[in-house]
Amino acid sequence: MKVRLMWYLGWVLMGSALLFPASQRLEVQAQFIDNPKNSPNNITQTLTKDELYFGLSKQQGQVSEAEWKVFLEEVITPRFQAGLTVIDANGQYLNAAGILTREQTKLVILIHSDTPQEKQFIQEIITQYKQRFNQESVLRVTSSVAVSF
């Protein structure tokens, strides 16, 4: 049996980093299995989850949607072809001068094995974004997660 859930989020502050507008619709699909022990998809494994927060403000305006898509296609996707998630968000932070900065943000979520190669890929992505768009930083949040497919 498949169930489709939809709801609207109000202004939600997540980890003092993101605000999701009330008009954003979130859709979730869930599949319920009568006997999960017999399901071939009931394999749980521990992987690494990296959340990368890419601010879209730059000295001369904004990183455009077209510029972001090129960066995603040229830099991120080749390194994580197995899959990733991109979420549009609004963020805020104190910059190096101590000024509160609010900006549109792209949140990229990567679920992957914790290998030296994948750690290097993530660092390359961060470095290239900072260089290409003259960014002060890219926030990276890393955690260990239990996943099943």
Image (cartoon, helix red, strand yellow):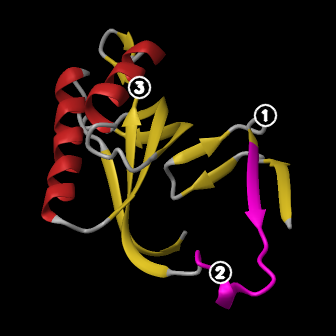
Q: In which quarter of the image is the C terminus?
A: bottom right
Is 46 situated left or right of 7 in this image?
A: left
Whichever of labels 1 and 2 marks the residue nearer the N terminus, that label is 1
The outermost residue toward the bottom is: 37
Instruction: Write the residue at 68% across / 51% down.
Output: 12
The kind of residue tagged 1 is: Ser
Taking depth in this image into account, of 48 and 103 the one nearest to the observer is 48
Is 32 situated left or right of 56 in this image?
A: right
Task: Residue 75: name its quadrant.
Answer: top left
Instruction: Report, in whole angstroms, how far the alpha carbon at label 1 lies from the one at label 3.
Output: 20 Å
Whichever of labels 3 and 2 marks the residue nearer the N terminus, that label is 2
Instruction: Write the residue at 84% across / 55% down.
Output: 5
Magenta span: 26-41
As displayed, is residue 141 above or below residue 23? below
Instruction: Write the residue at 76% across / 47% down.
Output: 27
Taking depth in this image into account, of 72 and 88 the one nearest to the observer is 72
Which label is found at residue 23?
Answer: 1
Q: Quadrant of the N terminus?
A: bottom right
As displayed, is residue 86 above or below residue 115? above
The kind of residue tagged 3 is: Leu
Taking depth in this image into account, of 97 and 35 the one nearest to the observer is 35
List x then y, in percent, for residue 3: 85, 61
Is 97 situated left or right of 87 in this image?
A: left
Is 94 situated left or right of 126 in this image?
A: right
Instruction: Report, in whole angstroms, how far the alpha carbon at label 3 lies from the one at label 2.
Output: 42 Å
Where does label 3 land, which residue? 56
Q: Is mark 3 on a helix, strand or loop?
A: loop
Instruction: Report, in whole angstroms, how far the alpha carbon at label 1 lies from the one at label 2.
Output: 37 Å
Where does label 2 land, which residue? 39
